[in-house]
Image (tube, rainbow, N blue to C red):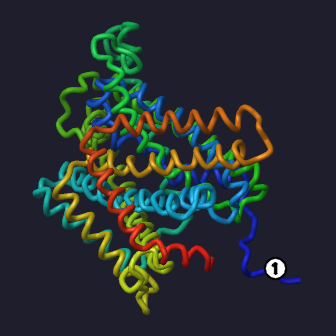
Amino acid sequence: MEQDASHLKRSLRLWDLIFYGIIVIQPTAPMPVFGVVSQEARGHVVTAVLAAMVAMLLTAISYGRMARCYPSAGSAYAYVRGEFGVFAGFLTGWGIVLDYLLNPLICTIWCSKAAANLLPIPYPLWALFFALLFTLLNLRGVEASARTNRWLAILMGAVVAGMLVVMARYLLHLTPLAPNFLIAPFYNPDTFSWKAVSTGTAIATLTYIGFDSISTLSEEAIDPERNVLRATVLVCLFTGLIAAIEVYAGQLVWPDFRHYPDVDTAYSFVAGRAGGRWLFHLVNDTLLVATIGSGVGSQLGAARLLYGMGRDNALPRRFFGHIDARTKVPSYNVLFSGVIALVGALLITYQLGAELLNFGAFLAFTGVNAAAFSHYFAKGKDRGWSYAVLPLAGCAVCLYIWWSLRWQARLVGATWLILGATYALTRRQALTNTIQQE
């Protein structure tokens, strides 16, 4: 008997899911935000990265649990909508739209800064170049294959391993390292502040963005009820530990967090201090290639998300639901995302873009934790302590980190939410009809 074509083949084992999550996040994830987090957290980058890991682990458990009861959905939008209704689901989706639109924007900013380290062309020209590059590649329907992404992740892992060896050799040749110097990236009484570390943590969570994509593979996973949860948690744990090692070494090599030649590409200069110009260029170029890949992929992801909402008439269908007849790409959405990336790269900083992205992410994460509490404890028959304590703790930690974002990010993010709520309320009937037809 032929397999039903409407169902995906279940072939992904636990290690396949874990490797997929590592590829999505990338082994170099904490390096682009290192300088910004270092300055905001006053040198306590390791503490910020590990605190962010706690929030991500709690949220990962909720994602894994929700994948059990919504195995074909795999998104915060679907989980929140399923538990709390259309309007709450739309607001969560609206926050995710902010994420998707800002990812190519901050990739444009970072690539422009990294490229300027190699060739001193004015920043606006680099921003125009990368925004056009991402847009043109996506308009042509060029996508990296899974095999290419896997090899890139392996090569990045090799670069990270070699870099850490060079950094260790550099540190061992310094004068005898005092204990207070070695623990300073965790805690330095001269500069420590809970408020500063909380703000740094809110930005450091960008290191983990993408872990939730594992839940989208629920229909292709073997034993998804167990493996999606386990893979999501293990990927967060692995990412946090590797990231902590990377930023710990970086902070020891460059302990003066107040002065970087360029805060956005600070880790390249840290590598250069440890290994000279060759390591500076190796790390800078590796991060540039990785971020170009992220920029292209995230822009297409934004275009597809907007297309899905346009197709469902949650956004104006004529524009956002358009597909190019030749390339089968949502070309209007690609152009729309490209314009936002270029304009945003010229108007805002990398830090503000990262914080706004995390504004949307933590809105979604809080919603997923609340949905897990509602489904399993409030409405379900299983009243075990973990089904109450873990998601509520996840909500509390995510809300605390969300509130630790700078006021500029909260203001712009709140404005975005108000626009979304206004739009949703004016189209409530259309949204209700859409849901009823699904």
Of residues 171 and 437, the one nearer the viewer is: 437
Number of callouts: 1
Near mark 1 (Cα within 10 A), the count class, few <14, some 14-19 or many ≥20, is few
Query: The residue under label 1 is which amino acid type?
Result: Gln
Q: Compared with residue 201, is residue 188 higher up or lower down, i.e. above or below?
A: above
Question: Horizontal placement of 420 versus 6: left or right?
Answer: left
Of residues 273 and 348, the one nearer the viewer is: 348
Q: Residue at 50% x, 73% y: name it.
A: 431
Q: Compared with residue 258, is residue 333 higher up or lower down, i.e. above or below?
A: below
Question: Horizontal placement of 294 versus 60: left or right?
Answer: left
Of residues 79 and 220, the one nearer the viewer is: 79
Whether residue 177 can be seen here = yes
Outermost right residue: 1
Figure quadrant of residue 80: bottom right
Q: From the top left corner, tell me how far across and down residue 57 is, in percent.
A: 58, 38
Q: Residue at 43% x, 82% y: name it.
A: 321
Q: From the top left corner, tell me how far across and down residue 354 is, in percent.
A: 33, 47
